[in-house]
Image: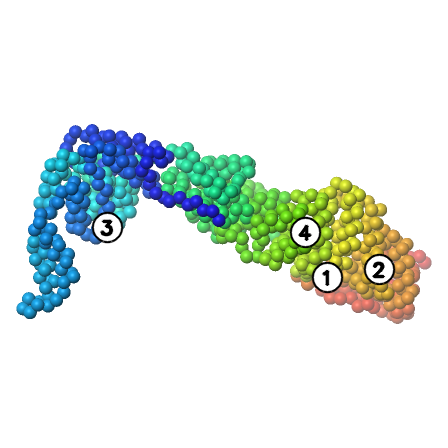
Amino acid sequence: MNNDFHADKPVSIESEDRFQRYNFACRIAKTIVQKKSTEGIIIGIYGAWGEGKTTVINFIDSELSKNEEVVCIKFNPWRYSDENTLLLNFFDKISKSLNVKLLNQKERTGRWLSKKSDFISCDIPKIGDISKVVNTIGNWLGSVDLEELKNRLDKIIIESQKKLVIFIDDIDRLDKNEIYSVLRLVKLTADFTNTTYILSFDEIAVSKSIGEKFGSGDLDSGRNFLEKIIQVPLVLPKAQPDALRDYCFEIINGIFKINNLDLPDGEGRRFALLFTTHLLNKFDTPRLIVRYTNSLSFSIPLLAGEANLVDLMIIEAIKITYPNFYSCIKENAEYFIGSHKDILGKSDEDKKNTVKTEIDRLCSGLKEKEKSSIIKLLQEIFPQLECVYKNMASYPEWKIEGWYKNKRIASQKYFNRYFSYSVIKGEISDVSFNQFINSLPIASEVDVIDNIERLIENSSADNFIYKLRRSEVDFNWEVSKKIASLLVIITELFPDNPQNYFLPSQTSRGQMAIFIFQLIKKHNNSKEQLYFSKEIIDKAVPLEFAFDILRWLNPNDEKSENIFTKEQIKEVWDVLLKRVLTEVGENDIFEKFPEEAYFICKFWEGLAKDEFNQYVHKILDKNPQKSISLLRTYLPRFRAMGDDKYRDGDFDEKTYKYFITILDKKYIAETIFKIYPETELRKQEVKWRTRDEVGLSDFEMVRQYYHWYSHDLEELK
């Protein structure tokens, strides 16, 4: 991972000036140099955190240092614990800058003894602890009146014939007591001759701190206090939006370059439009830009190839500029990526109102224009949010599929990645999956199978086939044949567990059958389609999976789905039937394939009715008991919500009428009578199963058939 983090450092060279601070600083420096009066003056440079106050001070210092008559001093008030220490060290800093000793020999000796007393600890008879004695002597020798020191220092400044410029930066970062001490220091020494103070701070922050210490405790009280100290208040000019934009985009381009990444033209324009329209005005200081781009330096390398980079850059910008919105999005995904339907599929107004209320809460304190802008931005990256403000319940599935394919934050499959900065355990990495897809044309069959096994092992068959299906339109014919030919021989990797789904086609194996059908369907050469379909049907294991594929290949009422004629389907069916009969051997389809028997019968009688009848007659003539299996094969089946398996329905009139269009009703009845004599069937009342009843006995089923059969005979009479 390549990172290019930017330190939030002030600059001091004119060539590094991005926000027109240098000229502002030069004008201040020029004014100081040209100042004729020898009276001291206090200049305040006001600006918010991160606006570039320290940069301006550096530029002023740089310009003034070119003049030999000016001595610049940067005083850091952070190091001192009390006012006396602060003041003494301030005086000491000035004297050293002028290469003059402020204290005489006696005073220096006294200060030295006071400092060393802590290291001397021994008792002397009749005197006691000598450290206390030394400290007392030191204090007596080193004692000097502060007013005297001040006058002495002022004289030194006058004699130096220099202009003194004292910079005190970052005052707004001190606590309120420390701020007050610094301002007292400046006020006390403001009358130094030929001295200019330049104080930089956030005026609002300092005014609040001073207001809390004095006056009524409000902002105005603090400002009134400042006005008595600062003689020349200068507000730092705002950085121009264009300069901030260019600075931001320059750093982002560098992040993309160092990580060898590119944005497609359309995506680049999308980011520029969203960022400049809705977010740029919130990045009003260089420091915010640095915070934002440092966040991107971390997140982009982690999610490159795993998320939509434009959505990532926008959500990271929201994190910096609207942290309360970011937290809400992270914790309430359903508000932003879920549909707004009720159980009937209609617009859920209660849910919509909940979302609106929450967004209104987040927008409290924003002006109407800014509120409108942030809501519009959220709708751009979370389109489902549009439904909240429109007469919609959800976007259509094809739209949602598009969000998935483009790895958008609006996709439920990708949302969490934008907040975890990683592929969550159990998901398939898009980078790994794309490597697999790109290797298909050249990889050996063994390598392809190994790669599939690895991807499934690290995730699941469901996730793998889900991603594969979203790529099906991108495969050319050669790759389609390769991947399909391999999938049909490794079906054991794809569980067939229909009890966990309401529809069998929802299983990973069912989805794989649809995937193979779609690959064949989108090819534009009928002859090649047919040849490959027969090849797949002959190859698929287990044999039941070949049934699944043929179900999709078979023509139906939707003309758009018909890729083969009935004659062509017969060719494919013949390949499957040959495999079926080979596997059945001496047994029969009802015994060998009880779950697929209806599919076999339906296909066979639809494509070769006489041949199918001959097969049935052969089975029943040999073993009349098989007529029970035959009838049960044609029973309607249903599965209620919550059922683990399908249930048999009744042999109702509709089933009977369809059944006798295929097989001779008299022949079937006579075969049944060999098991259950007609006299026995007549004695029993027909019983129809209620919906809650489970199972239908063989006799009950036969009696239902006989009910319809005898009804037919009565009508004939």
Mark nearer the N terminus (4 vs 3): 3
Which residue shows up at 16% across the image and 45% down it?
91
Q: Tell me the SS state at disc 3.
A: helix
Image quadrant holding the C terminus, namely bottom right
> Distance between the Cα atoms at labels 3 and 1?
80 Å
Mark nearer the N terminus (4 vs 2): 4
Residue behind mark 2:
581
Q: Is 265 displayed left or right of 560 in the figure?
A: left
Q: Tell me the SS state at disc 2.
A: helix
Inspect this view and state whether residue 247 appears.
Answer: yes
> Distance between the Cα atoms at labels 4 and 2?
34 Å
The amino acid on which the numbered mark 3 sits, given as a three-letter code, is Arg
Where 64 sits versus 584, above or below? above
Residue behind mark 4:
444
Kindly check if marks 2 and 1 are in contact, taking CB atoms under 8 A apart as contact: no
Q: Residues within 10 Å of mark 2 (few under 14, many from 20)?
A: some
Mark nearer the N terminus (3 vs 1): 3
Residue behind mark 3:
79
The numbered dot on residue 646 is: 1
